[in-house]
Image: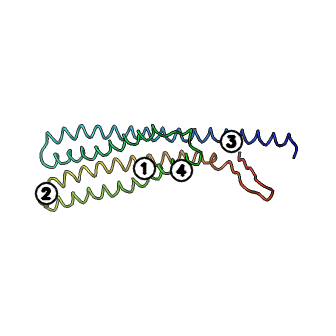
Amino acid sequence: MRLNQIIFIIILLSVAATAYSQNAYEFYSISQQTNKTGMYVLGTWALTNMAAGAYGWSRYDGSQKYFHQMNLMWNTVNMGIAVYAMYSFSKADPLAMTATEMLRDHLRKENLFLINAGLDVIYIGGGLYMRHLANRGHQRAEMLKGYGNSVILQGSFLLVFDLVMYVIQRNHRLSYHHIFSSLQIGPTTEGVGLAIGF
């Protein structure tokens, strides 16, 4: 192999690697920004429900009191999740990550939204069961009715939230699929080969 061929291959590899890294960084930056926006939505929902819940808990009686009480408690957890997620995003350093690590982190969060959507269905079912017990004359019917209505509301919001976030992140990943499958380096019968897809 001549010297000019070796130089050409080195330049080609450098250009391909740079373009690949830039595209992977762009992909991950958009992914992180989408997740941040989602946590702002979750945090706003939580803060609103905490304020309304505190007010309703102190103002109302019966099942409405328990409805607001559960809203306050449930959204204290939601707020904690949103704050922790934002803190984690601030600590992430995409420049120190490989493209594979970026994709793996994206997939972990994407799948987490789908898993959470499954849990949300269970929450809604639990709320419906509490309402069922309340309607059957349970001795704590007011509490069960209030808690059940709250869990149905919160589970329904989270179900919509998690499914929307999952679909957005899945579509985002698929729109960049060509980037993660375009550069392949591996052994061949004549040594190491490079395949670049266009």
- Where does residue 111 sit, x and y in percent of width and height? 47, 53
Q: Which mark is residue 140?
A: 2
**Distance of mark 2 from mark 4, alpha carbons?**
47 Å
Q: Label 1 sits on what residue type?
A: Leu
147 sits to left or right of 165: left
Residue 83 sits above or below residue 142 on the image = above
* Residue type beneath disc 3: Ala
Mark 1 to mark 2 CA distance (whole Å): 34 Å
Q: Residue at x 81, y 39 (%)?
A: 7
Write down the residue under mark 4: 104
Disc 4: CA contacts within 10 A as few (<14), some (14-19) or many (>=20)? few
- Check disc 1: other Cα within 10 Å, few if <14, some if 14-19, many if 20+: some
The residue that appears at 43% across and 38% down in the rendered structure is: 37
Quick one: label 1 or label 2, which is nearer the N terminus?
A: 2
- Of discs 1 and 4, which sits in the foreground? 4
Q: CA distance from mark 1 to mark 4?
A: 20 Å
Of the numbered discs 3 and 2, the one sitting upstream in the chain is 3
